[in-house]
Amino acid sequence: MFRTLRSRLLIGIAPLLAIMVALGAWAIVMFTRLGGNIDVILRENYKSVRAAQDMKDALERMDSAALFAIGGRDDRARKQYDEFRPAFETSLNIEQNNITLPGEQVMADDLTRLYSDYHRLSDRFYTLPSGSPERSELYFGELLPTFDAIKQQADAVLDLNQRNMETENDRARDAATVSVRLMILALLGSAAVATVIALVLSRSILGPILAVTDAARALGKGDYNQVVPATTRDELGELAVAFNATARRLREYQQAGTARLVRAQQTAQATIDTFPDPVVVVDPVGSVERANPAARRILGVSSSEADAPWIPLPQLQTPLAEVLAGRGDYLPSGVEQAICLRDDGQERFYLPRVLGMRDDDGPLGAAVVLLDVTKFRLLDQLKSDMVSTVSHELKTPLTSIQMVVHLLLEEAVGPLSTKQIELLIAARQDSDRLLAMLNDLLDLARIEQGGVKLDLKPVTSKDLVGQAVERYEARAHDAGVALESHVALERAAVLVDRERIDHVFDNLIGNALAHTGRGGSVRVSAKADDGSVRFAVTDTGEGIPPEHLPRIFERFYRVPGSRVSGGAGLGLAIAREIVTAHGGHIEASSELGQGSAFTVFLPSAPRENGTPRAEVDI
């Protein structure tokens, strides 16, 4: 029994190598013979055939020269004869030096003798006078018969060599046929031997390899209880021993890894369970993988096991889908975006946050966390109520103060000095600004508390933009600012509360004019945008610093260092609330020193005519 796989392979391949060497040697001998036969044909016969043919051609030309001479053209005749005579002699010399067949020497000698006679008669022929009867008699009596005899002898040499070439060709063909038959038999025999050797090798070598392959496939499918028998002491036996050791170690790792995985899962679940707020972990397709008791209690998640069915809240469906699609985390910060849910019969407010989980290969899922902001919501509500109450309480005495100032300015109680009038005018302006601030606070409080009803009607974008621009044309002219409008689709309509939306446009256009210096421009435009209408108010004013841009829609926030003073910082906050109540949204972009752009997106109105008026609480 062989100790190594290499020795077994060499023993099995040795007969095949011997057969290949034998067939190769035989093929070399066979090709050498065939090549020798072909060389003989070319060397011994082809030269004679070519020489005989060339002699015939040259002799024909020499005979034609004699006919020219008979016709009286001696110059051309002698020239042609002298031109082809060396060619005939050269071919005759080749034939005399290439005698290879029996009887060919006699033919060559006869050709030499006949040519000598032909040459002697030709010299005599050309010495006779041109046109003499003796020349014609010599040609037809002696020169032409000698020509025919030479031509017949050349044909005999040609025929002898051609017959020999055909004979050798048949012999070479027969030899090739025999060789092909023997080669086929040898190949069949070698194929039979190779088949036997392959069968023997497959049983002794491929059998153990197939066993290891099948065991490896089972191992790859997770079946680690695989053992391959080691029946030999060669490399295949060592492979079987190594495979068995690997399978045993994988079984050990599997058992240890399963235990660690179970502990990790238990730890992860315990960690999630410790959160008082609802936490839900979903996979890339949105199925629940984990959920803590708060999520099961409040959101209705039935189980914390994988693939548990769960339909997210309507407020969470869009953010969750966007996060799973890889569009960034959903991280709202304002308590006004909180969701009201019931927990143990009590209403509580939760701020949703959707965080994507990713690795280098792509998304792994998302974590939905609901932060309990009930206290902050109540504080915000309390603040709004307080602001509303204080604003309402201040509005009455402030109105009275305005009336008193107005009466004093009309000098209803007596004449005033110039200084008194200036002070009263300043007091009236401050009271007007304070009253406007109180009205903004009251409007914002009513909007946030849902105390305002929207009277929705379809309005074309052309009318909305055109009338807004008309209201500020005089102010823009006085400020030296170019105010222009552009409506891409004049018939595009939106379903809005005209009074509230006009307030939004008044705020945006008024701010743009206030922050744009003389010689600048303000542009109001509208165009359709995928199911909505996009309105934009763009100016060439001072712009907003990038660090302040995210906060400009916050209540009471004013950009520091602005060229416009006054105001409580409530206009943009009110505008955002109104636009949001209409189902749209507002955006801002700016470049310091280049201007700002405020964009309002409002849903398009239905295309049907006669759309009924709708009332919506905000």
Image (cartoon, rainbow, N blue to C red):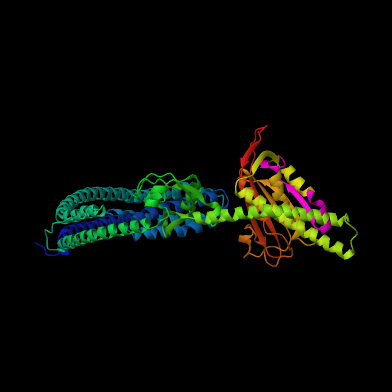
Residue 172 position in % (x across, y down): 27, 51
| Front residue of this view, candidates 437 and 173 | 437
Residue 311 position in % (x across, y down): 43, 44
In the picture, measured across the screen, residue 528 lies left or right of residue 210, that is right
Residue 446 drawn above or below residue 5: above
Residue 513 visible to the viewer = no
| Front residue of this view, candidates 85 and 248 | 248
Magenta range is 471-498
Residue 490 position in % (x across, y down): 72, 42
Q: Image quadrant of residue 361?
A: bottom left
Q: Image quadrant of residue 530?
A: top right
> In percent of the image, x 64 and y 45: which residue is there?
602
Q: On the rendered image, what quadrant is the C terminus found in?
A: top right
> In percent of the image, x 70 and y 62: which residue is there?
543
Residue extending farthest left: 1
Residue extending farthest bottom: 561
Q: On the rendered image, what quadrant is the N terminus found in?
A: bottom left
In the picture, measured across the screen, residue 133 lies left or right of residue 198, that is right
Residue extending farthest front: 413
Residue 504 position in % (x across, y down): 69, 50
| Front residue of this view, candidates 466 and 578 | 578
Residue 547 visible to the viewer = yes
Whether 488 is among the magenta residues is yes
Q: Image quadrant of residue 498?
A: top right
Whether 81 is among the magenta residues is no
> In percent of the image, x 19 and y 57: which residue is there?
16
| Front residue of this view, candidates 67 and 537 | 537
